Image: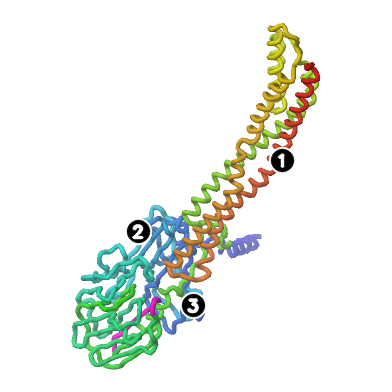
Amino acid sequence: MKKIAVFALVLWSLLTAGAVHAAWNADWPQRVRIGLNTSAEGLPITAAVDSAPVLVRLHTGNFQFIEAKPDGSDLRFIASDDKTPLKFHIEKFDGLNELAFVWVQVPKLTPGTKDAFIWLYYGNPAAAAGDDAKGSYDAAQALVYHFDDREPLPQDATANANHALRSTAQAIGTGLIGGALAFDRNAELVLPSTPSLKSGTNGLTVSFWIKPADLADAPLYTQTEGAAPLVVALRGGKLQAQSGTLTATASAPVTAAIWQHVAIVVKDGLTIYLNGQQVAQAAGNVPDLSGAAVVGKGFQGELDELQVSTTARSADWIRTAALSQGQDQKLVTHGAAEGEGEGDSGPSYLKILLGAVTIDGWVVIAILGVMFVVSFWVMITKAMFVNKAARDNERFKAQFEKLVNSIRPGAQDAAVEKAEKETARAYRYSSLYRLYAAGAHELRERFSAYAKEGRAPTLTDPSLNAIRATIDARLVRELQRLNAQMVVLTISIAGGPFLGLLGTVVGVMITFAAIAAAGDVNVNAIAPGIAAALVATVAGLAVAIPCLFGYNYLQSKISELTSDMQVFVDEFITRIAENHSV
């Protein structure tokens, strides 16, 4: 028995081992698996890339901004072992518009791996900011400009503090990755002359993204000091790098009006890369480069993500940067959001959808929720009212003959008044009784007036018409009472789907805008945002459909009561004329 118990315990442990994930820190209840695909289907590399700063784009389609702090200060990136924190820094985090750019230093990217991943944790409202821009880059990274459009001068994100000396270019917020600089041929960006920007035995790498307005000849990057200044320029629609007597001209042309990655490696000559592919090489000796550099003087277009490294980056490093930062990147993938206690039972699609709903969508859903509650309250109370009215009407019809024959000329004594009050309580929901009461009151008032005048208690045609007018007036008020608040249902039926459609259209617009701004264009990025936007339409239909059924049911009941009242008025007037007219 003891062995069986031990075996059962071991078996249970194995079966339940995957039911709960081992969280890095229980204070961070939400996490997303960030895949790093270096296989042929992703971003193929031929050799390992160490300490690569990988751009993670977050937007409506892949991240639950509503669960994170508005400034993203609760973000944490953890290695695949779910233990080791990774250095990262946030370039931009816009919780309102649900868009963020985060740079994460991945210790190593191994070639041919499609199952590598890191964890993104969030959801701790008490967390302090954990990003570290200075620690996100290796020691060879001398300068990184993200071009935040809120900065008067471009600021260096590395620990070297190589901030720009001067910039006359226009800062814009619609670059490839957040902000960028726009050049008009006269504008320029001047880099400082510091020892940390000097090339040495390890070489030099300069990279940036450009979006030329045209392909006119123009210098892009000029490092003027040194025995052989470095000039990177557009010449004849192609990239050209020159230093002293060495000149390298790209074999592939640059394309106007689209973003392209440019990298120049200076070591044992000049090597040019365009969009991660080597397009030119000139072997030879290049003296050390130092001093200030001028960027964009004579160029017309936009420039983003300027980086300078005091080492010759490998071809795979440059390929990783080019193909992981662009709009069609295939390196980074996003898994489904995992909440506390979800385990490995599979993603909650409802949670994914609700987590991707934008703020405007929640506003629409909240309005629809109020409409839903109010409409159901109207349907329930109105259904109870009309059913009670129909029940009391049937009871009143059985007593109508007796009551109408009891209306006789004579004094209105206390006994009659008491009987009327008891009858009113007995048929308080009956619309027919209230019509009867209006006519009976009018008839008794006339009998009382005739008795005082000494006239015979008989009714003429004008008197009958006057009594009918009184009953018809009461009929109108009863119809108004029956149809009261029905407009709430018609508003919900007609307005619910349109409100939902409005939320969907705005949500789709925001999703596409966020994805376009993030530059993460793929089905996995688009699908969650579009699906979440459709939640608003579902909410609108969820309001309208029950209201439609309820409205038709109530309208049929009201129509029956209306028909009964119209028939009753004719019958009542006929009986009065029969009993009391000449």
* Image quadrant where one finds the C terminus: top right
Quarter of image, res 417: top right
Residue 118 covered by magenta stretch: no
Q: Residues within 10 Å of mark 3 (few under 14, many from 20)?
A: some
Quarter of image, res 279: bottom left
Q: Residues within 10 Å of mark 2 (few under 14, many from 20)?
A: some
On the image, the x and y values in percent for residue 123 come to 44, 56
Residue 260 covered by magenta stretch: yes
Mark 3 or 2, closer to the camera: 3
Residue type, label 3: Gly
In the depicted structure, whether residue 541 falls above or below residue 472: below
Q: Please give left or right for residue 361 compared with residue 447 in the image.
A: left
Q: Residue at x 56, y 58 (%)?
A: 534
Label located before the other in sequence (2 or 1) = 2
Q: Which residue is mark 3?
A: 42
Q: Which residues are magenta?
A: 256-267
Label located before the other in sequence (3 or 2) = 3
Q: CA distance from mark 1 to mark 3?
A: 62 Å
On the image, the x and y values in percent for residue 558 come to 70, 37
Q: Secondary structure at mark 1?
A: helix
Residue type, label 1: Ser
On the image, the x and y values in percent for residue 215 come to 35, 82
Q: Which residue is mark 1?
A: 556
Q: Secondary structure at mark 2?
A: loop
Which one is nearer the viewer's eye here, 125 or 148?
148
Mark 2 or 1, closer to the camera: 1
Q: CA distance from mark 3 to mark 2?
A: 32 Å
Disc 1 to disc 3: CB gap under 8 Å: no
Q: Which residue is mark 2?
A: 129
Q: Please give left or right for residue 188 compared with residue 434 in the image.
A: left
Residue type, label 2: Ala
